[in-house]
Image (tube, rainbow, N blue to C red):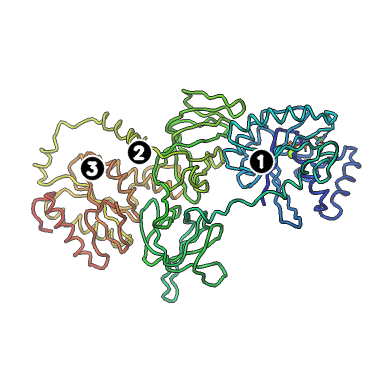
Amino acid sequence: MNIVVVGHVDHGKSTVIGRLMADTGSLPQGKLEAVKAHCAKNARPFEYAFLLDALKDEQAQGITIDTTRCFFKTEKRDYIIIDAPGHVEFLRNMVTGASRAEAALLVIDAHEGIKENSRRHGYLLSMLGVGKVVVLVNKMDLITYSMERFTQIRKEYEQFLSLIDIKPLGFIPVAARLGENIVQRAGWYSGKTVLETIESFAKEEPQDRKPFRFPVQDIYKFTENNDDRRIFAGTIESGAVRVDDPVVFLPSGKRSRIATLEGFNTSARREASAGSAVGFTLADELYVKRGEVMYREGEPEPRAGTRFKARLFWLGAFPMVKNRKYKIKLATARSAVYLAQVSLVIDAVSLSAHHGKAQIEKNDVAECALETSKPIAFDLATENSALSRFVIVDNYEISGGGTIISMESEETSLLRERIQNRENQWERSAITDIERKARHGHQAKFIVITGDSVEFISSVARALERGLFDAGNMAYYLGDSNLNLGLDTDLTDPSELREEHVRRLGELARIMTDSGQIFIVTLTECDAYDREILARLNAPYEIAFIAIQRDSLEPNSKAVLAISPDVSVAEAVESIGRYLQRESIIADYTI
Ligand code: GTP
Ligand code: MG
């Protein structure tokens, strides 16, 4: 069981853990004596915290900077105790520590009383969904073990916790430095000690009764010895699944059936459930990307979309602002994300709410709308927390995190706004589309050829360009790398580069179609959303998607023409030509 210890700076978190370790005999042989001797030699008073605060800086300043993990075991079970820092500067580390925890000990100094981070940490526990919370009122020795003061702190803090939906499992008066009520009961207190309390924590309700969720971590393709298995690997977040179950991937909407279940170094099984790392093979050959979520048909579906409302806490050095690109990580999905709207900012200490703020400051909690640059699959916090938690990365650093509380309509998307803005400002030519069409003898068209084989689709595109040109049309094929090599970008992440590539293609297509040309490009691994983006960017002109691939198309693929990859280049060009003629894009078909 993972337990995190949180609370305000210096309230005694590390001491609680040090004592717990020492008094249960969990420290390595001689460690206690060595640290004591070291302190004596340097003429410093011994601190139990030194048993944990391993970093030199931490000992010098007497504070915890990063989370430390300690292990100990009782007859009942093994524990991982996470020591979180209490200083507000290290909230990020506290969150990282707490996000892995099943239960929390929240430490409050009896003498100092409830401080900012006593509240803020409480709030974050509630947001992270750490439901089991026990409050330790520490340093009872400093208030001469006053039961009255203890009760007062208990009342006050209980009230705060009730506002954020945490029902504490108990309040324990302790003096960690003296080891009182940690492992050994002391004074007037007759309830459970800290050790007895954590021993009594019930294990999390098993996740395998929830709907099946499998975020795709990786796809392994085996090619040796005619082995053409494609294994979808990852960890089951919730639920269970069996061989032969019908499954669906989101956001693509692709469907198949579980063919086999492959374990790592285990023999084949027929079912697997939450928590296990597995690989699946499917009955159909599907191209599914990392980050998609597999669910079981018939069970409640995850959501999929680009816009949702979230409760988010911000830890970044700079405020979270609109129009800046951040990165979101949700299960295995990664995407660029923008702050679309701030509904409400909550002060996690006073719980007061502020409306009308445009940005989210450091240590603020906010309710806001976020928009990803491509659809991701998720659940709502109230439905299935595993797929509702996310973190926001800014400049390679985790700068915020939160949970999704509702799905938002995409009617008011930032992309739509951007395109509308572009159209409003578009300088319209004095030459009309009709004049151009009359001159060229054909309509303008953006043709996107998608498929699995780069060589094949570019040969088709090249031959199509030649055919159309020879027949007297204005056709232009843009080579795959021609667009990006000339235009500078500081993006390095392949998925961001790809996104930018698609965006540039769409913008360029808008210009090329406006000029009356038949503009041909190729794109591999094109999914429904890429098609949607291209279509939106190219509007008001229409787009023709030609798919030359083995894999079945997504339910909403938008492709106007599907061609088998087994045909020859000439045959493929022939079918595209016939399509163009059928749609009256070109006058007569003579390629
Ligand atoms: P950060 O990690 O920096 O947030 O601090 P912390 O919460 O881990 O506090 P730490 O355990 O380092 O203790 C802070 C100080 O409080 C140390 O000097 C401890 O010796 C002292 N302290 C801890 N428990 C008790 C106690 O029960 N009584 C008294 N009198 N002092 C205590
Ligand atoms: Mg500490």
Does label 3 point to a residue whose CB lies under 8 Å from ligand 1? Answer: no
Residue for badge 1:
133
Tag 2 near tag 1, CB within 8 Å: no
Q: In this view, does 316 lie to the left or right of 180?
A: left
Does label 1 point to a residue whose CB lies under 8 Å from ligand 1? Answer: no
Q: In this view, does 368 lie above or below 300?
A: above
What amino acid is labelled 1 in the image? Answer: Val
Residue 102 location (% of width, % of height):
63, 47
Tag 2 near tag 3, CB within 8 Å: no
Quadrant of picture, ligand 1:
top right
- Distance Cα–Cα, label 3 vs label 1: 61 Å
Q: Quadrant of the C terminus?
A: bottom left
Compare marks 3 and 1 and give the one earlier in the sequence: 1
Q: Which residue lies at the image location 14% right of the left edge and 45% below the top edge?
A: 443
Q: Which residue lies at the image location 83% right of the left edge and 40% below the top edge?
A: 180
Q: Residue 410 carries which label?
A: 2
Q: Which residue lies at the image location 75% right of the left edge and 55% below the top edge?
A: 73
Using the image as rendered, state which of residue 245 and residue 228 is in the foreground: 245
Q: In this view, does 188 lie to the left or right of 587?
A: right
Q: What element carries label 3?
A: helix
Residue 481 location (% of width, % of height):
35, 51
Front of the two marks 2 and 3 = 2
Compare marks 2 and 1 and give the one earlier in the sequence: 1
Compare marks 2 and 3 and give the one earlier in the sequence: 2
What amino acid is labelled 3 in the image? Answer: Met
Q: Residue 492 carries which label?
A: none
Q: What element carries label 2?
A: helix
Residue for badge 3:
512
What amino acid is labelled 2 in the image? Answer: Glu
